[in-house]
Image: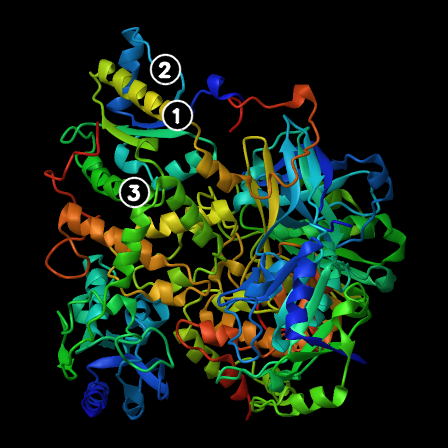
C-alpha cells in the first residue's frame, strides 16, 4: 500500500532572513536516492510540514535547472509558518511534492518574457526567472518588474542585485509611495503604474505575473491595453490547499482543482473560472 | 446475472457464519450502521427509514491516522499508518447508499491513488437490499438511481415472499464471497424477484439532472444563493451524513512531547474557515457562496470532471437539516 | 393564524421592521424558517405545534443584522418567537449581543411543540424540552398573539435520565459519556443551531494554539463536548436545538439540563428570564459559596 | 510500571500574586512537599481556562490543582470571584461526566501561607495516590495509538527531554 500523504524528510541547510516576516529555507532531501531522482518544473509547488503543527503550501522558489538545492520562501501568517519560523538550520521538516502543473516554458521558447511580481509573489516568479536565465539563449528580451510595499519588504535582495547587474536583463524595482528610504534609487509607484509607464511591447511576449490579488486585478487591464493576448498572460493561483493531490476539495473552484489542474493558469483559463480565488 | 434464493432462517445462519469467520458485519441501525455481534438482532426491513449517517465512515473514516512521527532534537522518524485488513460485510444497505463507492472511487483514484480508501474498499462486501421506503426527501430516481438499483452492490437482496429472499449476484467479488457459503443458497427464480421489484413504488422524479447542470453553468450569480445562505446556519451536518461528500482536512496532533500523528479528518465546505487563507482572505466569505459551491460541486463540477453526479439522492442532508433546507427542492428549482 | 399575518404585514408596511423572521408551512406537519422582507410575503407566516426552530439564532448573524440597515437608518428586526425562544433573545440582550430596541418580538402563546416533524401532536410526541416548561406566555414581547391552551402533562424524561446517570459509578458514567461522545462527527450542528453560540470564531476553530482538537476521535470529541457544555452552563436557556440538530443523536440535553440545574441550585439563577439582572457567569457575588475551595 | 512504584503526576495552576508566592515561601522556609506537583504560573485564577485542565488530563495528568488568592484579595479585584462561579460549573460538569471529585481540586492560598500550600499539595497528592492512575482519561488517548505501537526507536542522542520541550 502506497501512502500518498507521506512526506520526504528534508534538512534545512540554510536559512535566509528576507524581510522581518519572510524567510527563505534551503532544503536538502535526506534520502539520497530520492534526492537523486527528484525533479520538478518551474511553477510547481510542494507541501512543507512541521511535525506537530501541520503542513503548508508554497511554491518551489529555486529553479529546476539548479537541482542540487530546493528553496522555498514564506511569509509568517498562520500556524505552520509560525512553526517554520522557529526552526533552525539542521532541523528536519516534511516535504511533499512536487505537485501541480508548471509554466509552459518549453513551448514559449523564442519569445520575449515579461515578469511582474509583487511582494512575496516574487517567489514563484523567481523560479521561472532563474530557469529562463539558465536557458538565456532560447529567449529574447527579458524584463523584470518587481514591487513591494516598502524597501524593507523587498525579498531576494541578493537576486535583485544579480539581475540588475546583468546586461541582457531589464530589471525595474519599485516600492509603493511612502515605502521608499532616503537612498532609494529605484522607482516609486504601484506596480500597474510602473508597467504602464514601462510599456513593454506585447508582440511575441509572454507575461508571467504573480502577487497580491489586488495587484493582479489592476495589472491585467494594463497588460490588455498594451495588447497582450489572454493566452500570453500567466499567473499562479493561491487557493488554500491541504492535500495537494486533488482529493481534499479545498481548492476546488469551478471544474478545476487548483492543486492538480493549476496552480499555473493563463488569463484565458482564469476568465472561465468562477471568481473564487 | 446469477440469481439464488435464500430463506430468512438461512440468512441469519449466513450472517452468523460471517461473524464466526472473523469478518466485520455491519447492518443499519437507527442512527448509523452498527457493528453486529449477534446476527439474530438484524432486522431486514425494506420499509425502514435510512440511517441518519451513511456508511462512508467505514471506508473513509471520520478521523484516520495517516502517519505517526517521533521528533528528536533535529531529527524525525516516521511510521506509516496501516489499514485494518479485516474483511467487512455490510448487510442490508439501501441502494442510495451502495452507489456511493462508484462515485467516491473516482475522486480517490483520479491521478494520485488514495490507498487508505482503496484498501478498505477492496476488503468490503456490499450486500444491498431493495428499498420500499420513500418520503418527501428521497430523490434517488432524479440522480439516475432507483430503489431497486444494484449499482455498487456486490450482492443484492430482493424479498420475494414472506420467507425468502432472492440474492442477485452482481459482481465477481460477490460471487467469490458466497462461494464459501453455498450451502445456504438454492437456485433462483428471476421472474419472482422481477415481479417483486416492479411492485416497488418509485419516488417521483423531481428534476432532470441534465437541465440542472445546464442551469448551474449559466447561473453562478443568482439571488437564490443568498436566499439559502441567509437561512443556512453553516454547520456541516449535510456534508458529514452525505454518503459521497469527501472533503477532508489534514491535521497534526501531538500525543506526547515527542510523538504524534497526522490525521485525516472529515471537513465540510459549509464551514467558513474551510477556504480561509492565513492572510485573512476568504474566497467564499459568505454562506450563500458556500451553499452555491455545495450545489455546484455536486451537480456540475463533479459531473464535468468525473461524469458522475456527486449525489445518491438519499435525502439525508435534508432530513437532518436543523433549518429544513431541502436540497431536492432547491435543485428542482434550478431551472428557468 | 390570521392575526400573525396581519400584524407582520402591518409592521412591514409601516416600516417598523425591516424583516420578520418566522415560520413557513412546508406540509401539514412540517414548517421551516423564513425571512419575510415584503408585506406580500407576510401571508406565508404560520405558527403551530410544528414550529420547532428557535429563530433567535438568526438575530446574531451578520447578514440578517444587515437587513435591518436601510437607507442609513436601522429598522427593527421582527421575530416570531415562542416563550422559550424569547428566553434566548433575553439572554442575547443580557450579553449585549442585541439591543432590546432593535428587535420587535412577536411573542406567541405556546402549549408545546412536537419532538420531530411528521408527528401528531400529543402527550407522547411532546418535545422533551416542553415537559418541564412553565412559560406558556411570553415574558417580554411587543405583541402577544395566539391562544392559551394546556400543555399535555407527561413525565420529565430528561430529568429521569439525568437521575439514572447520576446513580452510576464514576467509571460507568465516564464510559457512558465516552460512548455517546464517540458518535460525534464534529459537524458542529449543535454549535450552529444554538442561539447562544454566537462567537465569531469558536475556540475549536482556533489553531494557534489548538486547545480543542479538531479530530472526531474519542479524545477530541470528549474535549469538544465538555467545552461546549461548559461554555453554555449558566447560559443555556434549554431550547433543545442542539440535540435536535445533532445528526448522531447524542443526548446533549443531559448535559445542558444538568448544568441548568446546577445554576438553579448553586446560584438560584435561570438564564434568560430577566432583562434587569446581569448574566450569571458575567457577574459575581462576594457571598457566593466557598465550599469548593480548600 | 508496577502499581507500587507509581507516582501520580499532578499539575497545579497557580496565580502569580498569591499561591505562586506562597509556594515560593514554602521553598524559602525549607518546608518539604511532594515533588509530584508541577507548577504552572498564570497571572490570575480568573485567567485559567478549563481547556487548560482538559489539556493537562490529555497529556497524562492524574490530578490537577487550581489555586488563587483568597476572596477579596485578588490582585485584579474580582478575578477570583469570576473564577469561583466558573469553577463551580466546571467541577460539577466533570464530576457528572465521571471524573472523580479529587482529580480536580481548588484552593485559596495567600502569599503568606507557605504552610497551607504544603498542606494543600500533600492532600491532593495523597488523594490522587489513593485513587490511582487516571485510567479513564488515558483510554481516550489510546485510540489509534495502541493499534500501531511499534514506533521505530530514535537515536538516543536525539531524544528530547521533557524539560527541553516547548
Nearer to the camera, A238 or A11: A11
Labels 2 & 1 near each other (Cβ < 8 A) = yes
**Mark 1 crowdedness (10 Å alpha carbons): few <14, some 14-19, many ≥20:** many
Q: Do marks 2 and 1 both belong to one polypeptide chain?
A: yes
In the rendered image, which quarter contains the C terminus of chain C?
A: top left
Q: Which residue is mark 3?
A: D90
Q: Which residue is mark 1?
A: D10
Nearer to the camera, B152 or D166: B152
Kind of element beneath mark 3: helix
* Of pointers 2 and 3, the one earlier in the residue sequence: 2
The answer to whether D107 appears left or right of D104 in the picture is left
Kind of element beneath mark 2: loop
Instruction: Using the image, determine if residue B273 lies above or below residue D90.
Output: below
Q: Gap between marks 3 and 1, in whole Å? A: 18 Å
**Mark 3 crowdedness (10 Å alpha carbons): few <14, some 14-19, many ≥20:** many
Scheme of colours in the image: rainbow
Amino acid at each position: 500500500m502506497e501512502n500518498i500523504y507521506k512526506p520526504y524528510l528534508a534538512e534545512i541547510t540554510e536559512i535566509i532572513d528576507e524581510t522581518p516576516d519572510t524567510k527563505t529555507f534551503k532544503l536538502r532531501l535526506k534520502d539520497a536516492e530520492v534526492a537523486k531522482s527528484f525533479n520538478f518544473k518551474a511553477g510547481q509547488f510542494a507541501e512543507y510540514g512541521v511535525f506537530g503543527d501541520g503542513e503548508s503550501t508554497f511554491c518551489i522558489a529555486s529553479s529546476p535547472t539548479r537541482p542540487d538545492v530546493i528553496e522555498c520562501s514564506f511569509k509568517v501568517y498562520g500556524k505552520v509558518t509560525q512553526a517554520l519560523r522557529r526552526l533552525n538550520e539542521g532541523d528536519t521538516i516534511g516535504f511533499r511534492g512536487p505537485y501541480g502543473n508548471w509554466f509552459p516554458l518549453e513551448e514559449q521558447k523564442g519569445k520575449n518574457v515579461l515578469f511582474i511580481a509583487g511582494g512575496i509573489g516574487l517567489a514563484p516568479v523567481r523560479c521561472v526567472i532563474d530557469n529562463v536565465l539558465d536557458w538565456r539563449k532560447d529567449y529574447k528580451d527579458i524584463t523584470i518588474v518587481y514591487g513591494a510595499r516598502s524597501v524593507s519588504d523587498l525579498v531576494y535582495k541578493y537576486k535583485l542585485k544579480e539581475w540588475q547587474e546583468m546586461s541582457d536583463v531589464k530589471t525595474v524595482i519599485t516600492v509603493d509611495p511612502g515605502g521608499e528610504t532616503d537612498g532609494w534609487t529605484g522607482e516609486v509607484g504601484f506596480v500597474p503604474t510602473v508597467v504602464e509607464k514601462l510599456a513593454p511591447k506585447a508582440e511575441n511576449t509572454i507575461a508571467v505575473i504573480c502577487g497580491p490579488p489586488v495587484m493582479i486585478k489592476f495589472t491585467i487591464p494594463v497588460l490588455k491595453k498594451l495588447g497582450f493576448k489572454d493566452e500570453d498572460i500567466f499567473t499562479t493561483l493561491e487557493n488554500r490547499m491541504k492535500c495537494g493531490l486533488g482529493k481534499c476539495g479545498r481548492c476546488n473552484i469551478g471544474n478545476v482543482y487548483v492543486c492538480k489542474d493549476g496552480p499555473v493558469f493563463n488569463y484565458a483559463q482564469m476568465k472561465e473560472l468562477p471568481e473564487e480565488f | 446475472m446469477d440469481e439464488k434464493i435464500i430463506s430468512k432462517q438461512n440468512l441469519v445462519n449466513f450472517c452468523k457464519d460471517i461473524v464466526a469467520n472473523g469478518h466485520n458485519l455491519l447492518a443499519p441501525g437507527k442512527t448509523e450502521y452498527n457493528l453486529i455481534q449477534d446476527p439474530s438482532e438484524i432486522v431486514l426491513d425494506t420499509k425502514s427509514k435510512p440511517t441518519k449517517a451513511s456508511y462512508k465512515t467505514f471506508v473513509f473514516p471520520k478521523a484516520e491516522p495517516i502517519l505517526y512521527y517521533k521528533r528528536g532534537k533535529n531529527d524525525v522518524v516516521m511510521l506509516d499508518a496501516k489499514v485494518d485488513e479485516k474483511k467487512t460485510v455490510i448487510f442490508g444497505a439501501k441502494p442510495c447508499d451502495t452507489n456511493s463507492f462508484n462515485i467516491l472511487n473516482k475522486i480517490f483514484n483520479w491521478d494520485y491513488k488514495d490507498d487508505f480508501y482503496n484498501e478498505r474498499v477492496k476488503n468490503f462486501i456490499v450486500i444491498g437490499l431493495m428499498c420500499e421506503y420513500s418520503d418527501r426527501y428521497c430523490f434517488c430516481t432524479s440522480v439516475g438511481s432507483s430503489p431497486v438499483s444494484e449499482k455498487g452492490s456486490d450482492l443484492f437482496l430482493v424479498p420475494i415472499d414472506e420467507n425468502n429472499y432472492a440474492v442477485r449476484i452482481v459482481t465477481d467479488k460477490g460471487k467469490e464471497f458466497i462461494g464459501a457459503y453455498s450451502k445456504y443458497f438454492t437456485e433462483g427464480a428471476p421472474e419472482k424477484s422481477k415481479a417483486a421489484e416492479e411492485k416497488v413504488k418509485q419516488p417521483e422524479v423531481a428534476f432532470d439532472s441534465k437541465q440542472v447542470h445546464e442551469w448551474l453553468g449559466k447561473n453562478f450569480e443568482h439571488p437564490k444563493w443568498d436566499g439559502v445562505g441567509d437561512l443556512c446556519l453553516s454547520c456541516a451536518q449535510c456534508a458529514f451524513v452525505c454518503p459521497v461528500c469527501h472533503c477532508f482536512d489534514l491535521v497534526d496532533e501531538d500525543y506526547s512531547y515527542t510523538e504524534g500523528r497526522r490525521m485525516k479528518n472529515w471537513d465540510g465546505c459549509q464551514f467558513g474557515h474551510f477556504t480561509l487563507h492565513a492572510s485573512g482572505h476568504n474566497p467564499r466569505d459568505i454562506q450563500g457562496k458556500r451553499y452555491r459551491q455545495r450545489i455546484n460541486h455536486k451537480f456540475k463540477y463533479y459531473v464535468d470532471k468525473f461524469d458522475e453526479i456527486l449525489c445518491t439522492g438519499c435525502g439525508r442532508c435534508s432530513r437532518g437539516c436543523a433549518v429544513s433546507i431541502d436540497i431536492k427542492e432547491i435543485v428542482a428549482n434550478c431551472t428557468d | 393564524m390570521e392575526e400573525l399575518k396581519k400584524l407582520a404585514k402591518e409592521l412591514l408596511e409601516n416600516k417598523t421592521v425591516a424583516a420578520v423572521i418566522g415560520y413557513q408551512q412546508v406540509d401539514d406537519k412540517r414548517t421551516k424558517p423564513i425571512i419575510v422582507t415584503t408585506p406580500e410575503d407576510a401571508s406565508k407566516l404560520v405558527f403551530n405545534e410544528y414550529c420547532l426552530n428557535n429563530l433567535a439564532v438568526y438575530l446574531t448573524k451578520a447578514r440578517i443584522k444587515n437587513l435591518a440597515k436601510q437607507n442609513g437608518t436601522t429598522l427593527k428586526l421582527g421575530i416570531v418567537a415562542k416563550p422559550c425562544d424569547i428566553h434566548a433573545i433575553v439572554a442575547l440582550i443580557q450579553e449585549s449581543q442585541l439591543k432590546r430596541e432593535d428587535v420587535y418580538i412577536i411573542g406567541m402563546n405556546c402549549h408545546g411543540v412536537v419532538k420531530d416533524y411528521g408527528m401528531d401532536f400529543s402527550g407522547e410526541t411532546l418535545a422533551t424540552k416542553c415537559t418541564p416548561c412553565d412559560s406558556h406566555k411570553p415574558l417580554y414581547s411587543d405583541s402577544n398573539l395566539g391562544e392559551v391552551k394546556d400543555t399535555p402533562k407527561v413525565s420529565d424524561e430528561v430529568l429521569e435520565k439525568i437521575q439514572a446517570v447520576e446513580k452510576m459509578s464514576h467509571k460507568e458514567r465516564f464510559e457512558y459519556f465516552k460512548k455517546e461522545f464517540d458518535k460525534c462527527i464534529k459537524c458542529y450542528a449543535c454549535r450552529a443551531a444554538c442561539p447562544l453560540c454566537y462567537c465569531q470564531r469558536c475556540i475549536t476553530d482556533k489553531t494557534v494554539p489548538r486547545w480543542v482538537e479538531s479530530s472526531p476521535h474519542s479524545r477530541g470529541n470528549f474535549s469538544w463536548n465538555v467545552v461546549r457544555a461548559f461554555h453554555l452552563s449558566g447560559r443555556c436557556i434549554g431550547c433543545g436545538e442542539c440535540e435536535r440538530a445533532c445528526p448522531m443523536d447524542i443526548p446533549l440535553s443531559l448535559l445542558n439540563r444538568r448544568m441548568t440545574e446546577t445554576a438553579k441550585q448553586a446560584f438560584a439563577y435561570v438564564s434568560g428570564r430577566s432583562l434587569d439582572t446581569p448574566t450569571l457567569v458575567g457577574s459575581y457575588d462576594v457571598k457566593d459559596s466557598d465550599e469548593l475551595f480548600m | 510500571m508496577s502499581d507500587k512504584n507509581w507516582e501520580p503526576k499532578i499539575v497545579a495552576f497557580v496565580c502569580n500574586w498569591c499561591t505562586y508566592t506562597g509556594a515560593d515561601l514554602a521553598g524559602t522556609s525549607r518546608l518539604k512537599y511532594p515533588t509530584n506537583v508541577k507548577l504552572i504560573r498564570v497571572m490570575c485564577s480568573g485567567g485559567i481556562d478549563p481547556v487548560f485542565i482538559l489539556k493537562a488530563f490529555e497529556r497524562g495528568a492524574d490530578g490537577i490543582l487550581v489555586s488563587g488568592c483568597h476572596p477579596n484579595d485578588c490582585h485584579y479585584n474580582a478575578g477570583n470571584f469570576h473564577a469561583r462561579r466558573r469553577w463551580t460549573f466546571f467541577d460539577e460538569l466533570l464530576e457528572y461526566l465521571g471524573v472523580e471529585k479529587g482529580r480536580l481540586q481548588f484552593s485559596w492560598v495567600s502569599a503568606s501561607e507557605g504552610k497551607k500550600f504544603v498542606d494543600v499539595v500533600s492532600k491532593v497528592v495523597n488523594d490522587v495516590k489513593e485513587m490511582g492512575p487516571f485510567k479513564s482519561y488515558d483510554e481516550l488517548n489510546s485510540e489509534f495509538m495502541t493499534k500501531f505501537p511499534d514506533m521505530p526507536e530514535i537515536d538516543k542522542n536525539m531524544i528530547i527531554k521533557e524539560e527541553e520541550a516547548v
